[in-house]
Amino acid sequence: MNDDEGRKKKEERRKKKEERRKKKEERRKKKGKPKLKLKIKTKKKNMLGLRRICSQACTRAVRTGPSTWRGFAAAAAEAADASKEKVEEEEKVENEEGEEKKEESNGEGSAKKEIEGLQEKVDSLQKKYMESLAEMENVRRIAKRDVDQANTYSIQKFAKSLLDVADDLTRATENVKEEDVEASQPLQTFLEGVRMTENQLTNILSSNGINKFGEVGEKFDPSLHDAMYEFDDPEQEPGTIGNVIKIGYTFKDRILRPAQVGTVKKR
């Protein structure tokens, strides 16, 4: 906007200057006076210009004869007036050009400040935009992780409730004496059914990522095992599991239930 206004003002000044020149030329033609060539360019050369004008008028009078001397005074006066008008006009033009340059300079300074302010706003908005993108990405990642975990471990509570059933089936098969089984055919058939049920439940749990751990002879690990008591056993290595009270289970990469064990006391 500032550049357009400056160009418009400059064009208006140029048109006014051209109109003044035309009017001056028309006045000269109406008076019927000869046009004198003025070679004054700057304010500092006023006297030099006057001397040149006078010299030109004298030379013309000498060449044309005595009749020209009568108009010499009038020509010199006219030349002086013309020189003065031209000097004033040049001063006016110089002042206008100075004001124009000043306005352009002020316009450039204000435009530069405006550009700097807009650049700061752009940088601030870009920073906020990048921060919002990073925050949205974090929210999306956390939500995806929560959904994946929910899908992966959705049956954790249900699987944990079945562990007691698996323990009961294991205890049922372990507490039956072999001689009683051999003596009773119905008990043998019943025990086989219980064992088949236990194996089927174990396979189902294993197919869903639930596996057993905690056996006699394993190294004791406090992150996996709960030590219920310690006892001396010279036949077993100290710091290992000597007795299993309740078997442990893992669900994928989590501990679904730690194993309850008795450990061999260190000597």
Image (spheres, helix red, strand yellow):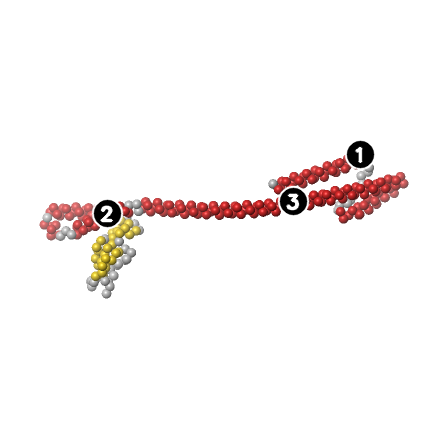
164 or 55, which lies in front?
164
- Residue at the image point whose x is 78% and y is 47% from the top: 46
| Mark 3 lies on residue | 103
Please tell me whether mark 2 sits on a helix, a strand or a loop. helix
- Residue at the image point whose x is 62% and y is 42% from the top: 3
Q: Is residue 160 left or right of residue 193?
A: right
**Quarter of the image holding residue 31?**
top right
Judge depth for marks 3 and 1 and give the one in front: 3
Q: Seen from this angle, which residue lies furthest top?
A: 30
- Who comes first in sequence, dot 3 or dot 1? 1
Residue 216 x, y percent position in the rendering: 22, 57
Task: Characterize the local packing of mark 1: few (<14), some (14-19) or many (20 or more) Cα atoms within 10 angstroms.
Answer: few
Q: Is residue 124 left or right of residue 231?
A: right
Q: Seen from this angle, which residue lies furthest bottom?
A: 267
Circle number at residue 187 = none
Q: Could you tell me the amino acid type at mark 1?
A: Lys
| Mark 1 lies on residue | 30
**Quarter of the image holding residue 33?**
top right
- Residue at the image point whose x is 65% and y is 44% from the top: 103
Task: Characterize the local packing of mark 2: few (<14), some (14-19) or many (20 or more) Cα atoms within 10 angstroms.
Answer: few
Q: Could you tell me the amino acid type at mark 3?
A: Glu
| Mark 2 lies on residue | 162
Q: Is residue 153 left or right of residue 166?
A: right
Question: How far apart are labels 3 and 1 at the CA level?
Answer: 39 Å
Q: What quarter of the picture does the C terminus occupy?
A: bottom left
Please tell me whether mark 3 sits on a helix, a strand or a loop. helix
Question: How far apart are labels 1 and 2 at the CA level?
Answer: 123 Å
Residue 4 x, y percent position in the rendering: 62, 40
